Amino acid sequence: MEERQQLDDEINLIDYFIVIARRKWLIIGITLLTAVTTAVISLYMPPIYMAETKILPPQGASSSMASQIMSQLGGLGAIVGSTAGIKTPNDFYIEVLKSRNILDHIIDKFKLIELYKAKTHEDARISLAGALKAKDDKKSGIMTIGIENKDPKMAADIANAFVDELKNFNRGFAVTEAAQRRLFFEEQLKDAKESLIKSEESIKGFQERTGVFKMDEQSKAVLEGIANLRAFIAAKEVELKVMKTYATPRNPDTQKAEEEIKGLREQLGNLSVKGSGHNPDPLISTDIMPSLGTEYIRKMREFKYHETLYEILLKQYEAARLDEARDAATVQVIDKAIPPENRIKPKRRQMVMIAGVTGLFLSIFTVFFMEYIKGERERFKDKGIK
């Protein structure tokens, strides 16, 4: 039984080869016709060039920066983060390149609506997004931006323009933690400066009115110490407010700052004693001070407080500015795009080979189909005779 089955299989294979051999010229003709037609069509296809630029997007803290940027984008950021499957900062920047804002800037700059013969901006965006080839090297972190165009020079110009747009995007949206601190301290510093000026004017007016220009050095030293401590507490409170803008109440740094402020306030309370009335005064009771000296001390105390606070906030502000400059998101260009010399499309040899293989299988299928039709006609003819 098995020998009979093997014999039938051999006979079927021989029949197939006989059919192919009998129609070989048809198979060869269809294959050659398909290949030659494809070759002729490829000769009439315009050459397409691709210019590439290689960049190194912001590294290090760029992951948190990317999440901050997406939060600023609102709905667009949610779409980019959820639907695009962003896993690395480079994936985020690739999606940014495809954003409507950047695509429209490129379209308007190079007048691509006319070049692409598009009816609307939407059509031009689709064409430009199709010409954009951005990829990420996971190992090195280098991102490659490629642009396909019929004009090699324009391809290079558009690729470089995408890098410029990415830089502009970072400058406009990359708000880091240091930038938040810098903006906050800038406002606090402005208020502290105004208070310091008012305090200076108050002392000046008092001195001009009363003629008091000096005070006891011991009282002065004590008051300066308390004023410095009050200013330090105020600066710490400002720092705590800044931390609460990006950290939770359970954050160890936040809790540490709160404990420091609590301890400093206790120390300030120990350095102050009650004088006459309801207001506490430092160490030296106001009862033994002349009335003019007491008023001068109070004004000097407020002046030293505002002066010290201003100095502390100024240092914090300068530190935030340095951190902001260090953490600024910069796009480093490794290779600038230049006009390519060789085309990438059409790949004529590859097109002809694929067309030839496709024509071969198509011709073989046609031959067997013709043989099947012929067999069916003969079978119906035999049935009619009987």
Image (cartoon, helix red, strand yellow):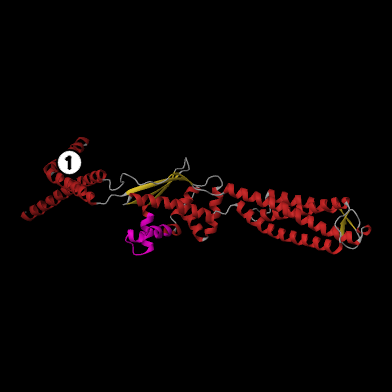
123 shown above or below 154: below
As for residue 114 lying within the magenta part, the answer is yes
- Residue 182 location in percent, x, y? 63, 54
Q: Say which of 147 and 209 sits in front.
A: 209
What kind of element bears circle 1? helix
| Residue furthest out toward the right | 288
Q: Say which of 80 and 212 sits in front.
A: 212
Residue 153 in view here: yes
Crowd band around label 1 with a 10 angstrom C-alpha radius: few (<14), some (14–19), many (20+): few
Q: In the rendered image, which quarter contains the N terminus?
A: top left
Q: In the rendered image, which quarter contains the C terminus?
A: bottom left
Q: Say which of 190 and 331 sits in front.
A: 190
- Residue 210 location in percent, x, y? 86, 63
Look at the image and give the residue range highlighted in magenta. 104-129
Q: Which residue is mark 1?
A: 12
Q: Mark 1 is on which residue type?
A: Asn
Judge left or right: residue 69 versus residue 340.
Answer: right
Residue 244 in view here: no
- Residue 192 location in percent, x, y? 72, 58
The residue sitting at 23% across, 45% down in the picture is 352
The residue sitting at 40% across, 58% down in the picture is 109
- Residue 223 location in percent, x, y? 84, 53
The residue sitting at 52% across, 47% down in the picture is 58
As for residue 195 lying within the magenta part, the answer is no
The residue sitting at 11% across, 43% down in the picture is 22
